[in-house]
């Protein structure tokens, strides 16, 4: 292992990373097709599956294009010894990346602190914490491959895993992001699009209750654009919610047989 | 009447479950005396095994191996390094085994699992010692540039026999490895030639350094089997539950010609007699044949 660490600093990837912004966005936005050939308001095909990890109380695997994520839920189980008494349950979230998750990341694949806390904040509004007092629910996510819109996929997958674990929730949780590039809005952006975006918009909502648990807007946005993005996300979330519901129903009927 | 029956069934089932939790050792010994295991396997039989290749598009070679519910994903990324002075025409392979918190309730974030570095070391020892890969094949420009293969294995679901599954996924990932075609550019750096990118057009005209060496030849493929020794019984391919109850594990690694590459018995209560060791090796030979068939099917397509 010592040899590896010594060598790690001196290796480099032969692949050349294109870090330039495509010039197409100047005037004729409409001629632009997205890298994967989707329409601007079209999400990637989603593959969802529950019960990916047998050792966990609940788990789910989500694949949106090249973004591949596994989420395991453990508990409710005993809280850590050091924590004080609490009437309501605790939620503990962690998001980590594999070393091969993205070609640019190199071997830095480790814990992602920012996403961990974002995931926690997105989920705490949906889970009925009072149903498991004194105990902790752990939600751990591993991004196997990062292909863009990682956080929304992690959040949606976590919602599915929580439902699979039988943790009480007010509703399923779904998340979708939108990128603003020039004048156009693109839903469910891939890595290349995220790399050259002017602004990003991510919404986490409960589709049946039409309530938003988390909304982050960064970068350059005009008010009409925000309204449009909001509408896009609400629609996409409700569709994703239905797909997740179907997935859970299928899993339930399969286990009945 | 039917209702009474079903409630009796249920209570009987609950009793069995309670017995299993309260007296796990006795529960298992009762099964063993019938030459059967709780999951319905005979003692010497390994669980169903699946291998899938090329799932990770961001890596140069990858494989997923599943033994029962134990799941491993292995991926290799090729990077360029300057070879050391002692071996100017050899590349290098760095193996790392990870147990992320998703794989088991015992692993918590921020605290790596105890087993992970142990398995990591054993894997890299076996891969380097069993002559599977000729490091000379990883040479690009003698003394100047060679490949460094980063092999990362992630455990996605831990249900016993982690080492076997990890080694299987590693071998499969090597068989899936596609080395990128590269050329030496003006600055003395190695760059990839991937067709279609304009910025590489000037490089493409030059000769690729490694036109033929796109695949590694795997000379010798190691296969492993972990067994539990418990009293007079030998259980092949244990689950996590079995590993937690009976603690004497024996791992046999054999190569393609059934030579022993590694034999590991890391302590434990039971002492292994020579006959037990012989039967472990026998079981490993049988398992090696099974695994060869599974990998053989993969190579065809």
Image (cartoon, rainbow, N blue to C red):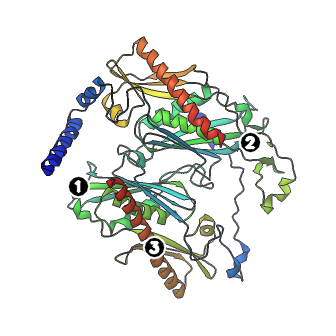
Q: Residues within 10 Å of mark 3 (few under 14, many from 20)?
A: some
Looking at the picture, does residue A152 appear above or below residue A137?
Answer: below
Residue A188: give x, y in percent of width and height.
54, 70
Q: Earlier in the sequence, mark 3 or mark 1?
A: 1
Residue B32: give x, y in percent of width and height.
30, 25
Separation of marks 3 and 2 at Cα, in angstroms: 44 Å
Judge depth for marks 1 and 2 and give the one in front.
Answer: 2
- Whether callout 1 and callout 2 share a subunit is answered no
Query: Tag 1's secondary structure?
Result: loop
Query: Tag 2's secondary structure?
Result: loop
Q: Residues within 10 Å of mark 2 (few under 14, many from 20)?
A: few
Q: Which residue is mark 1?
A: A84
Residue A104: give x, y in percent of width and height.
62, 56
Looking at the picture, does residue A155 appear above or below residue B182?
Answer: below
- Whether callout 3 and callout 2 share a subunit is answered no
Residue lying farthest to the front in this orientation: B1
Residue lying farthest to the bottom in this orientation: A224
Q: Chain of mark 1?
A: A
Residue placed at 69% from the left, 76% from the top?
A32
Q: Which mark is residue A239?
A: 3
Q: Which mark is residue A172?
A: none
Q: Which residue is mark 2?
A: B214
Judge depth for marks 3 and 1 and give the one in front.
Answer: 3
Residue A118 visible in the displayed image: no
Q: Chain of mark 2?
A: B
Residue placed at 69% from the left, 64% from the top?
A19
Residue A253: give x, y in percent of width and height.
35, 58
Looking at the picture, does residue B205 appear above or below residue A44?
Answer: above
Q: Nearer the viewer, residue B239 or B201?
A: B239
Separation of marks 1 and 2 at Cα, in angstroms: 58 Å
Task: Specify the quadrant of the image occupied by residue A157.
Answer: bottom left
């Amino acid at each position: 292992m010592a040899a590896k660490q010594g060598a790690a600093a001196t290796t480099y990837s032969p692949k050349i990373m294109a870090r330039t912004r495509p010039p197409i966005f100047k005037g004729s936005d409409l001629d632009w097709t997205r890298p994967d050939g989707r329409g601007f308001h079209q999400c990637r095909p989603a593959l969802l599956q529950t019960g990916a990890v047998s050792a966990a109380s609940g788990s789910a695997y989500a694949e949106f294009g090249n973004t591949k994520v596994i989420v395991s839920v453990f508990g409710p189980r005993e809280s850590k010894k050091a924590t004080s008494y609490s009437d309501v349950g605790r939620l503990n979230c962690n998001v980590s990346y594999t070393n091969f998750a993205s070609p640019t990341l190199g071997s830095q694949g480790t814990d992602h602190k920012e996403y961990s806390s974002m995931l926690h904040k997105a989920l705490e509004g949906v889970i009925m914490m009072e149903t498991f007092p004194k105990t902790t629910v752990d939600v751990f996510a591993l991004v196997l491959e990062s292909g863009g819109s990682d956080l929304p996929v992690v959040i949606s997958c976590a919602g599915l895993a929580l439902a699979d674990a039988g943790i009480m929730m007010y509703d399923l949780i779904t998340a979708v992001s939108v990128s603003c590039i020039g004048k156009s809005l693109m839903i469910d952006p891939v890595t290349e699009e995220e790399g050259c975006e002017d602004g990003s918009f991510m919404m986490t909502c409960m589709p049946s209750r039409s309530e938003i648990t988390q909304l982050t807007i960064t970068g350059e946005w005009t008010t009409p654009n925000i309204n449009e993005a909001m509408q896009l996300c609400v629609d996409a979330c409700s569709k994703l919610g239905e797909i997740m519901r179907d997935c859970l129903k299928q899993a339930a009927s399969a286990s009945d047989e | 009447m039917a209702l009474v029956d079903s409630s009796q069934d249920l209570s009987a089932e609950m009793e069995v479950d309670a017995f299993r939790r309260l007296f796990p050792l006795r529960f298992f010994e009762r099964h063993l005396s019938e030459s059967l295991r709780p999951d319905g396997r005979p003692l010497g039989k390994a669980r169903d095994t699946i291998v899938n290749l090329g799932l990770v598009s961001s890596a140069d070679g990858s494989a997923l191996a599943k033994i029962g519910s134990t799941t491993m994903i292995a991926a290799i990324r090729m990077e360029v390094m300057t070879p050391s002075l002692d071996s100017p025409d050899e590349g290098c392979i760095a193996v790392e085994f990870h147990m992320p918190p998703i794989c088991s309730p015992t692993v918590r974030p921020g605290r790596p699992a105890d087993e992970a570095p142990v398995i990591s070391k054993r894997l890299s020892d076996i891969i380097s010692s069993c002559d599977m890969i000729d490091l000379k094949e990883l040479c690009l420009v003698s003394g100047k540039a060679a490949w460094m293969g980063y092999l990362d294995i992630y455990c996605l679901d831990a249900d016993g026999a982690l080492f076997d599954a990890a080694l299987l996924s590693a071998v499969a990932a090597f068989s899936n490895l596609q080395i990128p075609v590269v050329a030496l550019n003006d600055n003395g750096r190695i760059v990839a030639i991937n067709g279609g990118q304009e910025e590489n057009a000037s490089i493409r005209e030059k000769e690729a350094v490694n036109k033929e060496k796109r695949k590694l030849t795997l000379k010798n493929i190691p296969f492993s089997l972990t067994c539990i020794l418990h009293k007079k019984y030998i259980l092949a391919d244990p689950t996590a539950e079995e590993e937690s109850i009976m603690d004497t594990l024996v791992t046999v690694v054999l190569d393609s010609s059934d030579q022993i590459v590694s034999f590991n018995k890391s302590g434990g209560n039971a002492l292994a007699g020579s006959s037990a060791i012989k039967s472990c090796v026998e079981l490993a030979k049988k398992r090696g044949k099974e695994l060869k068939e599974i990998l053989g099917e993969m190579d065809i397509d």
